[in-house]
Image: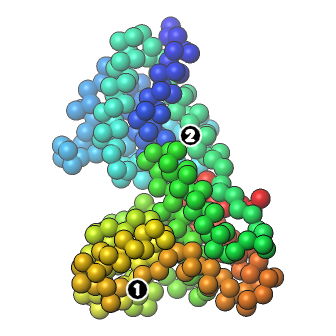
Amino acid sequence: MSDRPELLAALSSFRKEKNFLGQGPLCVALVVTQHARRSGLPLNADQLITEGGAGGQVVGLGRGAVQNILGRHGLTRILAKEGGRTSRGSLNNMRAYVALLNQLQERGLADIEAIEAFWIARAHDFFAGKPFRIKLDSSRSVRHIVRDVIAQAEERQRSAGGMYSAGAVMQHLIGAKLDCAMGKGEFTHNSFSTSDSQTGRSGDFLIGDVAIHVTTSPGEAVIERCRENLNDGLRAMLITLQRGLAVAEGLAGNAGLADRIDLFEIEQFIALNLYEMGRFSAAGRQTAVLALVERYNQIVNEVETDPSLRIEFR
């Protein structure tokens, strides 16, 4: 029988060192553990890749398989809409985890039931993740409220490698702000993990003839997407953090698009609209912030599977 404390220590150390902290790696761990249950150890990582070699995917990795594993343990909530299948680095994660399982087998620690229980516990932790918290304080600027939420998301992202909390929060805050200003139904909301190329979208949002891109770190790729928008007869708008604004301006200038892309800093973009919706009164601003957060949470519930992206007032 395996030494359970030693096994749990090995799994915990691996999880931290390899950043198995987000939805994608967790799905990989659950599915590969299932392969080990069925086929026994050691596993051959090359045999767990679908046809396509380096361009393939992990065999069996998908929403159905992941939810079946969770279901055996009484969990019915969706861990990931694609079951981790489209997560970046899933093949590398699989190879690293297979190596761990084989090492545990060599050490006589490969208790599959205990290993699966460890990852199921991490799924419970994920579903129980705490939402972001903000304080509705009339003495603070509206910009500071927006900044507070994004700062929390960035801190979570730093402490949980592989997660993109800040980008998701920014995208859905902008979506909520636009819904509050224009009314729901004017455009489509998508999960943060859904890329433009997957859906053929012109940007994160397309409203009228304006393609809106929201990003934490502007790079040449998003500037080229803006160029494509312009070539398609659309207006291009890029919304980013304060520190990204100068970078975006420089990249747009280098691309010869400085006078053709509208660049905005996210705090100002949201705050000014909240002032307008609140008719520049204290009570109105509070109502506008409440409406923004309510709509944001609705969007997260509709398009994301991570409930910890929600915002609560403290």
> Residue at coordinates 33% horizontally, 32% vertically from top-left?
96
- Determine if residue 199 is in view: no
Question: Which type of secondary structure does the marked residue at label 1 adopt?
Answer: strand
Image-based side of 308 in relation to 67, left or right: right
Q: Give residue 140's position: percent from left, percent from top.
A: 73, 71
Question: Which of these two is toward me, 227 or 151?
Answer: 151
Question: Which is closer to the viewer, label 1 or label 2?
Answer: 1
Question: Which type of secondary structure does the marked residue at label 2 adopt?
Answer: helix
Image-based side of 298 in relation to 140, left or right: left
Q: How is the image coloured?
A: rainbow
Asked if 135 appears above or below 273 in the picture, the reply is: above
- Determine if residue 36 is in view: yes
Q: Give residue 98's position: percent from left, percent from top.
A: 34, 28
Check disc 1 and report the residue beneath it: 262
Q: Quadrant of the C terminus?
A: bottom right
Mark 2, other Cα within 10 Å: few <14 / some 14–19 / many ≥20: many
Question: Which of these two is toward me, 20 or 83?
Answer: 20
> Residue at coordinates 43% horizontally, 91% vertically from top-left?
208
Check disc 2 and report the residue beneath it: 123
> Residue at coordinates 60% horizontally, 56% vertically from top-left?
152
